Image (cartoon, helix red, strand yellow):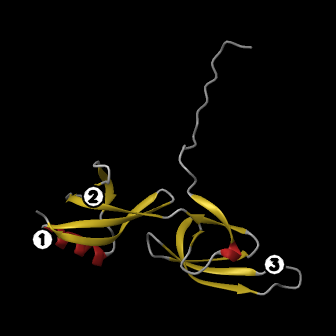
Amino acid sequence: MSDEEHHFDSKADAGASKTYPQQAGAIRKNGYIVIKARPCKVVEVSTSKTGKHGHAKCHFVGIDIFNGKKLEDIVPSSHNCDVPHVNRTDYQLIDISEDGFVSLLTENGNTKDDLRLPTDDNLLSQIKDGFADGKDLVVTVMSAMGEEQICALKDIGPKN
């Protein structure tokens, strides 16, 4: 045996996989699917009949859950598709900085300062107006495939 140390440069992260496989025929409307490397919510699924020699094909129409773009994909129904792990987490809003970042309070009492305000104008104005009025706001953050974005807002009453 040699006495020299072996050093490996690991490029992989130790976290769980960002997606999991699911058979295309089992994915339904309002589910999630990865189309063109983007996490999408399925808005339409249609299945074509098998051809003379082939597989039935599933035609998916999905809307990107972060930027709202419409994406389409056609996959044989027997093949596996990637399905993103989509999580929703509620955080209490502490502060909004001038450069468009929000400061959020996690459940264990730490702060989370790496999220930008949402790009949706309606949600953006609701958050800014509610914060300016001194209301206690809880934002819902949706995360999938390493991306996070504020997607909803709840008002839990005025600050004490």
Residue drawn at x 57%, y 40% as measured from the top left = 11
Q: Name the residue that disc number 1 marks.
A: 133
**Rendered image quadrant of residue 127:** bottom left
Residue at the image position 44 percent from the left and 69 percent from the top = 66
Q: Is residue 2 visible?
A: yes
Q: Secondary structure at mark 1?
A: loop
Query: How packed is label 2: few (under 14 Cα within 10 Å), some, or many (20 or more)?
Result: some
Where does label 2 land, which residue?
101
**How far is the residue under mark 1 from the one under mark 3?**
58 Å
Q: Secondary structure at mark 2?
A: strand
Q: Identify residue for label 3.
A: 55
Q: Is residue 105 above or below residue 58?
A: above
Of residues 14 and 5, the one drawn nearer to the viewer in this rendering? 14
Q: Amino acid at mark 3?
A: His
Q: Which mark is residue 156?
A: none
131 vs 121, left or right, is: left
Most foreground residue, 115 or 69: 115
Whether residue 9 sits left or right of residue 144 in the image: it is right
Q: Nearer the viewer, mark 2 or mark 1?
A: 1
Which one is earlier in the sequence, the residue at label 1 or at label 3?
3
- Residue 103 location, x and y as percent? 25, 55
